[in-house]
Amino acid sequence: MVDNGCRTLMKLVYRYRVKSLTGLLNTQARAVNFVWNYCNDRQKDALRFGRRWHTGFDLIKLTTGCSKELGLHSGTVNDVCQQYAKSRSQSRRPYLRYRGRKSQGWVPLKGRELKREGNAFRFAGNTFRVFYSRALPEGKITDGTNFSRDRRGNWFLNIVLEVPAPSARLPVRGVGIDLGLKNLATLSDGSRIAAPQIYRASEAALAVAQRARKKKRVAAIHTKIANRRRHYLHTCTSAIVGAFDYIVVGNINASALAKTSMAKSVYDVGWSSFCTQLAYKAVKHGAWFEEVNESFTTQICSNCGAVPDSRPKGIADLGIREWRCCDCGAVHDRDLNAALNILRRGRATLAVGIPVL
Ligand SMILES: [Zn+2]
C-alpha cells in the first residue's frame, strides 16, 4: 500500500439498523430462501442424473423471469444464485443445507440498485428508513451489500462502500502483539489487554433462561453477549491503531486450539475478530499491519536472541509466566518476551517493504 499518486481503494462495511418495512424484508427473505432451495434442488438433480454441475451463471439462466412472481428484485435473485454456487464450491460439498425458518434472514442486492435518499435508502421502489447511527461517506456502493436479520428479528442494512485508502503513515511507532488466553493480548510496550470474559459472565443468566425455555430471552442474551464482545474488541483495536504506526501480530492457529479443552476460552476471546479488525482499521487509518509466524517467539530470549536451556518449552511449561535467560541473565515475562520477539520479526519484514527506511 505505497502511495505513489494513484491511491488504492478499500472496502468498508457500514451497518445500519432498519426501522421501516421489516415485514417486507421478512417476506423477501422467505423468497430468497425459496430461490436458494431451488438452486439446491437443481444441484441435487445434476448429481442424481450425472449431469454437469451448475455454475452461478447457469443458475441465473434457470431462474430468469421468476423475480416478479417472487416479489424480489432480479439483482437479488442473481446474487442468491451466484452466492449459492460460490458457497457450494467453497464448502467442497456436493450440495448445501436448505434454508428455512431457522436460517438467518438474508436479502442480498446489487450495490448499484441502492440509492441514498437523505438519511434513508431507496431500493427496488421502496424507501428504507434506518437508524442513521453514523454518516455514510461518499463512495461507490458495491456488490456484497445486503439486508440481514439478527437472532432477535431486527433487520440491518450492510452497505459495502468503496472509498480511497488514506496514504500510509511513516512507520515510526511500532508494536508487537502476543495473543493469549489469560490476557487477550500482550503488547511489546508492556501494556496488556484483558480477555473479555463476557460469555462466562452471562452464563448464569443464560442457563436460567434456557431452563425456563424462554426463547426470546435466550436470543436476547446471545445478542447482548455478541454486542458487548464486539464493542470491547472495537475499543481495543481502535486504541491500538491510534497509538501505533505499525502493528505486528503473531498468528495463532485458532481453529486448532478450539478443538482442545481450552475451546470455550478460545471462542470467548475472539482472536480472529481482533486480528480482522486490526487489519482493516490499519488500512483505514494508514497504519501498517503484519502477521508473522509466532513459532518459538516464547522460547527465544528477546534480549540476546539466544534459545537458552532455561526457556519455557512446549505445552508442559505453559504455566511458567516468568523465566530467566541463562545466557544473558535477563528476566522475562513470558508474554512480553514473545511480544518483543514478534515486533522484531515484523521489523525485519517491514524493512524490506518500505523503500524510505
Ligand atoms: Zn538472553
Image: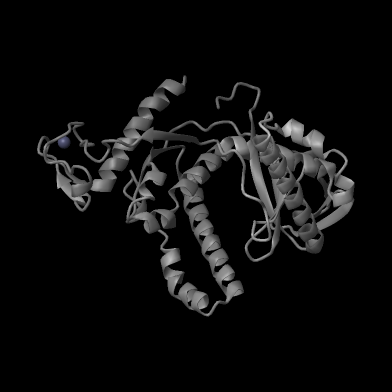
Q: Quadrant of residue 342?
A: top left
- Name the residue nearer the viewer: 245 or 316: 316
| Residue 182 visible in the current orientation | yes
* Residue 62 position by quadrant: top right
Quadrant of the drawing holding the C terminus: top left
Question: Considering depth in this image, is 231 or 80 the residue closer to the camera?
Answer: 80
Residue 183 against residue 217 in the figure, above or below: above
Vertical placement of 283 versus 197: above or below? Answer: above
x%, y% of residue 42? 72, 40
Q: Quadrant of the N terminus?
A: top right
| Residue 181 on image: x %, y % | 34, 54
- Most distant residue in the bottom direction: 212
Please give the name of the residue rendered at 21% of the width and 53% of the height, measured from the top-left corner.
319
Viewer-side residue, 112 vs 352: 112
Residue 261 % position (x, y): 32, 55
Residue at image location 81% in from the left, 33% down from the top: 61
Compared across the picture, whether 289 is left or right of 283 comes to: left
Q: Residue at x 68, y 64 (%)?
A: 153
Split into quadrants, the picture shows ligand 1 in the one at top left
- Left or right of 57, for residue 86: left
How far across and how far down the image is residue 284, in percent?
58, 39
Q: Write down the quadrant of residue 194 in the picture.
A: bottom left
Q: How many marks?
A: 0
Above-or-below relation of 357 to 183:
above
Q: Residue at x 76, y 60 (%)?
A: 26
Residue 83 in sight = no
- Left or right of residue 131, residue 241 in this image: left
How is this picture coloured?
Answer: one colour
